[in-house]
Image (cartoon, grey):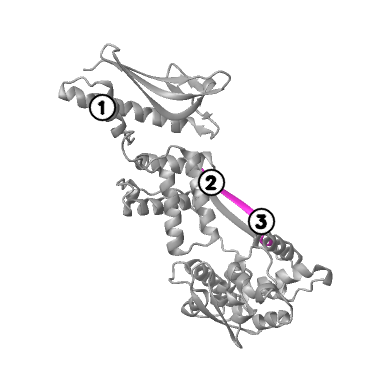
Amino acid sequence: NIKRVCQFLLDKEPGKPDAKLRYRIKWNHNQNIVAFNVGYRIDIDKWSTETQRCKNNTTHGKNKVSAAIINREIQRFEKIADDVFREFEIKKTVPDVALFKSKFNENAGRQHKDAQPRQSFFNIFDEFVRHEGDAKQWSMGTYKRMKHTKNLLLKFDPNLAFDKLDEAGLNNYASYLRDYMEFRARTVMKQISILKWFLRWAVKYKHTTNLSFQTFSVKMKTEEKTVIYLDWEELMTTYNYHIPETSSLLEKVRDVFCFCCFTSLRYSDVFNLKRSDIFNNYILVTTVKTFDSLKIELNDYSKAILDKYKHLELPNNKALPVISNQKMNDALKELGKLCGIDTPVTITYYKAGNRIDEVHPKYSLLTTHAGRRTFICNALMLGISPDIIMRWTGHSDYKAMKPYIAIADRAKEAAMNLFNRKSPTTENRD
């Protein structure tokens, strides 16, 4: 056996509360000494010299990296060193500094100084965003979601690498999102899904050969998604609600929202709707999200809303006076409260494995997307075939329609139960 002394040390600097962490290894009667930068800065008062680890439940450096992440990297460095020494012990040779350092860096996935520099995990993630964004013409919303995902990965581990994302690493990331970030179960699963999307791309373009993600799945309790929509009576109340002339903005918000309720348009598509997209009995739109070309027939309600604004001068030849999504969402909650749309709605979700039930008045949950959901739910309840509805909405399969179909089925069941009321003469029948 090659006797050695391995120690993690802090390179302290005058006046600084944290220090670089390095791994020093001595062997061959201390004649050979090598040190490796672990890649993290450690808050000095949160380091345990005895255990050679960060103290539990602490964070370190300006990025507030958790002790669990750093301690895992420490353990990885220890294993790499042991594996390298074992290789030389099997060969019954004692390595010099250069040979040991070269082998250690190779096993750690580090490049030799003369080798071609390897792209970092996050540089490759940026390349993925550029490539996929250009190829699939992502919306700004998708770019924002990807930026959010990258920031989460950076917070989880600023030195993240593909080889760290084995099953244990993926489990650690899921736990980090669930326990440290306190995300809901659905959010955790969505972030893991995005990460796996990136890893599939990275394998395809030969940035990694790590396939651990292919068999990895997050096992978390999830709730059935609550679909917020207006039933027909609520929709008619909103459509006919008298709004004072002093609240012209609220009136425009109501009209735009109702137009979505009668056409199935998303906010992005009604925002971009131009007068040139409108014909006698239908509109033609190319959706922002999916680039589908849709022909949507107009009904009396949607026609009346378009007619109301056809003489109003709007920028860029727009058909309707659409304000920003955030402002519209805020105004919709105010509108819903005025219209008395206050049915209690229970929102159930899971966080850190715990079930949480919250009750909200429906108006507080209204957003622009409720317009599209309102159209789908009411169309199903009116008995319109899902196949026809999908031609209006642009849905390509039944998977996205399933929650709406379930709502319509429950409504039909409740309606049929109205026939079960007993008449006064029923009990006297033979």
Instruction: Tell me the SS state at disc 2.
Output: loop
The magenta region covers 352-363
Residue 69 position, x and y percent, is 44, 33
Labels 2, 1: front one: 1
Give the mark nearest the N terminus, 2 or 1: 1
Quadrant occupied by the C terminus: bottom right
Is 1 magenta? The answer is no
Labels 3, 2: front one: 2
Q: Pointer 3: residues within 10 angstroms few (<14), some, or many (20+)?
A: few
Give the mark nearest the N terminus, 3 or 2: 2
Q: Which amino acid does label 3 sit on?
A: His
In the displayed structure, 31 sits above or below 89; it is above
- Residue identifier under label 2: 183
Instruction: Tell me the SS state at disc 3.
Output: strand
Q: Which amino acid does label 1 sit on?
A: Val
Q: Quadrant of residue 37?
A: top left
Q: Which residue is drawn at 40% across and 31% down?
A: 72
Residue 318 seen from this side: no
- Residue identifier under label 3: 360
